[in-house]
Image (cartoon, rainbow, N blue to C red):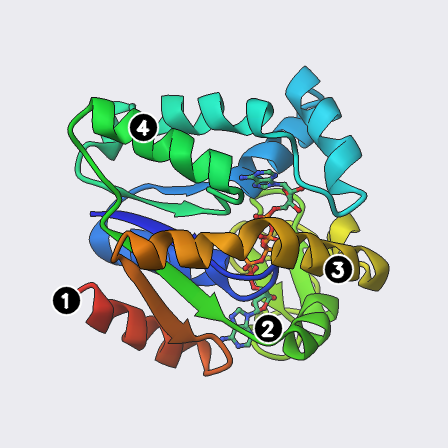
């Protein structure tokens, strides 16, 4: 089962991708998480990615594509995976299709988590991420048991640098310009499925599980 999560920044791709990965025992591959781990570890890739991410811009395709193609070729991806945050441009989608075609494989589902821009701005202000393990919460919609403490690892919670309102607005405009064309791309491929991302987290997940036929 090879699944792509589409949707605006903050639509809930990561929240749903983690639940899908847990239910179907497949890896959750988030390019945003990969970049954030590289930034935390001070790698060259992290330094380059940060300059784009902090401005709300996409990291250039050449820094992303090989990284993802290598990752999906690893042994644990044999039975499928859920890609969260990739592809984000038409060239990335074409590169993924080409790499999979060489292996006689293809993407099975592209799931668009649909949320209007006005809901996004409100959501992002309330998101909190664990500095240690990267788990995500929301002050209102997905709170931790103890204020400011990660339920999973006990780490501290922060507002991501790119979740500040000005950067969120920039990320939304980049999404509409560069990523939304993927909706047509996967509609034409006959694999696009849309879910209402404004529903409760569990209701969105139920809709996705139904699409996946499980
Ligand atoms: P990335 O980390 O992928 O950011 P994003 O796509 O902007 O998505 P987010 O992680 O912000 O949101 P999400 O949709 O996962 O929402 P979440 O589940 O957290 O990428 C960051 C940056 O890295 C990019 O801007 C770019 O620079 C770079 N990058 C990454 N991949 C790249 C690529 N392929 N090419 C180039 N550059 C790339 O939910 C948001 C909040 O809402 C949470 O607090 C959550 O608890 C809450 N929530 C979720 N669902 C619901 C719901 N149904 N109701 C109420 N609240 C909800």
* Disc 1 to disc 2: CB gap under 8 Å: no
Structural distance between the alpha carbons of marks 2 and 3: 21 Å
| Residue 152 vertical position relative to residue 112 in the rendered view, above or below | above
Name the quadrant of the C terminus.
bottom left
Going from the N terminus, do you reach mark 4 or mark 2 first? 4
Q: Which residue is mark 1?
A: 213
Structural distance between the alpha carbons of marks 1 and 2: 30 Å
Q: Nearer the viewer, mark 2 or mark 3?
A: 3
Mark number for residue 143?
2
Q: Is residue 51 left or right of residue 81?
A: right
Dot 3 falls on a residue whose secondary structure is helix
Q: Quadrant of ligand 1?
A: bottom right
Structural distance between the alpha carbons of marks 1 and 3: 34 Å
Residue 75 at least partly seen: yes
Find residue 39 and report its horizontal and vertical position in percent: 69, 30
* Disc 3 to disc 4: CB gap under 8 Å: no
Mark number for residue 98?
4
* Disc 4 to disc 2: CB gap under 8 Å: no
Residue 110 at least partly seen: no
Q: Which residue is mark 3?
A: 168
Mark 4 neighbour density, 10 Å: few (under 14) some (14–19) many (20 or more): some
Going from the N terminus, do you reach mark 1 or mark 2 first? 2
């Amino acid at each position: 089962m090879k699944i792509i999560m589409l949707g605006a920044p903050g639509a809930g791709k990561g929240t749903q991708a983690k639940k899908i990965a847990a239910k179907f025992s497949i890896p959750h591959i988030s390019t945003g998480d990969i970049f954030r781990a590289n930034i935390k570890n001070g790698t060259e890739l992290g330094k380059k990615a940060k300059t784009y991410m902090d401005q709300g811009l996409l990291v250039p395709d050449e820094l992303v594509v090989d990284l993802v193609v290598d990752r999906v070729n690893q042994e644990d991806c044999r039975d499928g995976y859920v890609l969260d945050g990739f592809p984000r441009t038409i060239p990335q989608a074409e590169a993924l299709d080409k790499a999979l075609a060489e292996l006689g494989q293809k993407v099975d589902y592209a799931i668009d988590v649909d949320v209007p821009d006005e809901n996004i701005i409100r959501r992002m202000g309330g998101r909190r991420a664990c500095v240690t393990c990267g788990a995500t919460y929301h002050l209102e919609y997905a709170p931790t048991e103890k204020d400011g403490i990660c339920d999973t690892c006990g780490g501290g919670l922060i507002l991501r640098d790119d979740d500040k309102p000005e950067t969120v607005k920039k990320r939304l405009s980049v999404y509409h310009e560069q990523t939304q064309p993927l909706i047509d791309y996967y509609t034409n491929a006959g694999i696009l499925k849309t879910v209402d991302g404004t529903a409760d987290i569990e209701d969105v997940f139920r809709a996705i599980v139904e699409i996946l036929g499980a």
